Amino acid sequence: MSTAYPLSSGKHAAQTIRIDILPRFSDIDATGVSVRDTGNLRRTLLNVEDYRFLFENAYDATLLTHEDGRVIVANARAERLLCCSEKALQEMNIQHIVSGMDETVWTSITAELKAARFLRITAWCARSEGEPFPAEIAVTRLEHGGEVWLCFFIRDETLKRQDEEALRTVHHAMQNAGTGIAVADLNGRLVHTNPALRRMWRIDDAAAPSLTLAGLLGGPIAEAVMAVIQPNAPSTWTHELPVHHDTEDPHWIQVSAAANTDSDNVATGVVLSFVDVSDRFRADAVERLHERDRVMAQSLGAVCHHLGQPTTVLLSSIEMLQMANNKDPELVQSLLEMSMTAAEEIRQILRKLNELDVYKAVPYLASDTSKSATAIIELDASNG
């Protein structure tokens, strides 16, 4: 199966056609019908030293074939790439080398070459030893002295395919990540945003191409983000900001930015990641609420603890005064003094609590010593 893609317009002689051929390795073998007829080609063109030198030192693996695909000559690069000697290659047809190139595909190729002269094929090629490899093949139709030859320039695309696969994997990872990811150019224009980011800000896909950092984060934050590409700037920048949607509670987003550089380590923009940290903010709020309740409980406990003893003395003195009924003046005077002392102590405690500006909890004896002691507020000299 093949697909043809016109790569340029204009006269047919200047056109290049692309054909993709799907591999079919079961059809590949190393045999072929040997119909060797080099004709005047070997006696003239390739026997000329300069032409042979250029042919042998071509960057691509190069095969010269008859119009029907029978191999005439191969350069050293082709021998190494296909793991096959030139003599063995001359026993083959190009259809034995390119996987999936059957008669139907070959007829299409030759027809296209007659119209366009040049053809680019994406296919898989077989080796006599080792695994097949993905290849890009440029084909040229040559006419000389009434003869038609085809020249195949074969380039191993294994590394390119691996890089493309790695890029494809990274692209899929970015598109499906739960974390928002964006790439901005040097002008602060967002050249890429993944779906997670657009969901965070509720941005329509149609509006995404016109987004800017300033429009997304605000001018001051955008300036801080772009500062990471400046010389001697920190390698990363992190900030947390709220994102508001109508009347909903704000979503807190952590933004991290780093410089995006090219192969020469020159800054080309900024890469940003966005993480929704709203759950952490909510958990912190709950923790602060619990801490406030704990402080309130300890405050009440401190008041009860510090006021308990003088209050008991005051109440006891009042009860004894009632019982004395002014019958013993000395006892009454003593009870009055005790009451005044207890009342003064209560007044001092209330003053200290009112003026308290440093919260300091100290353990209070618990009934079960195996458990943590209850904490109450300490009223030390610094608070008095």
Image: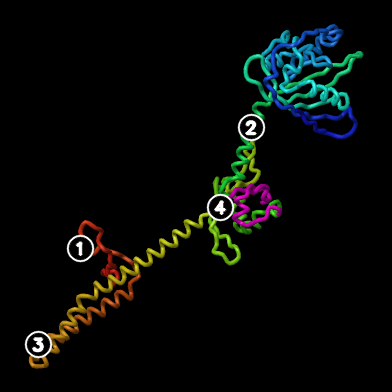
Residue denoted by label 3: 331
Residue type marked 4: Val
Mark seen at residue 367? 1
Say which residue appears at 79% left-offset and 13% top-offset.
70
Sequence order check, earlier mark of 1 and 4 = 4
Front residue of 344/192: it is 192
**Mark 1 Cα within 10 Å, few/some/many (few <14, many 20+)?**
few
Location of residue 281 with respect to 117 vertically, above or below: below
Q: Residue furthest top?
A: 43
Query: Which colour style is shown?
Result: rainbow
Residue 62's spot in the image, x, y percent? 75, 17
Which callout, 1 or 4, points to the residue nearer the camera? 1
Magenta-span inclusion, residue 298: no
Sequence order check, earlier mark of 2 and 1 = 2
Which callout, 3 or 1, points to the residue nearer the camera? 1
Mark seen at residue 179? none
Which callout, 4 or 2, points to the residue nearer the camera? 2
Location of residue 135 with respect to 49 vertically, above or below: below
**Residue 117 location, quadrant:** top right
Alpha carbon distance from label 2 to label 1: 70 Å
Residue 212's spot in the image, x, y percent? 67, 54
Say which residue appears at 24% left-offset and 76% top-offset.
307
Residue type marked 3: Leu
Q: Is residue 101 left or right of residue 196?
A: right
Which callout, 2 or 3, points to the residue nearer the camera? 2
Say which residue appears at 63% left-offset and 53% top-offset.
198
**Mark 4 Cα within 10 Å, few/some/many (few <14, many 20+)?**
many
Residue type marked 1: Ser
What element does badge 1 sit on? loop
Magenta part of the chain: 180-206
Q: Residue furthest bottom?
A: 326
Residue type marked 2: Asp
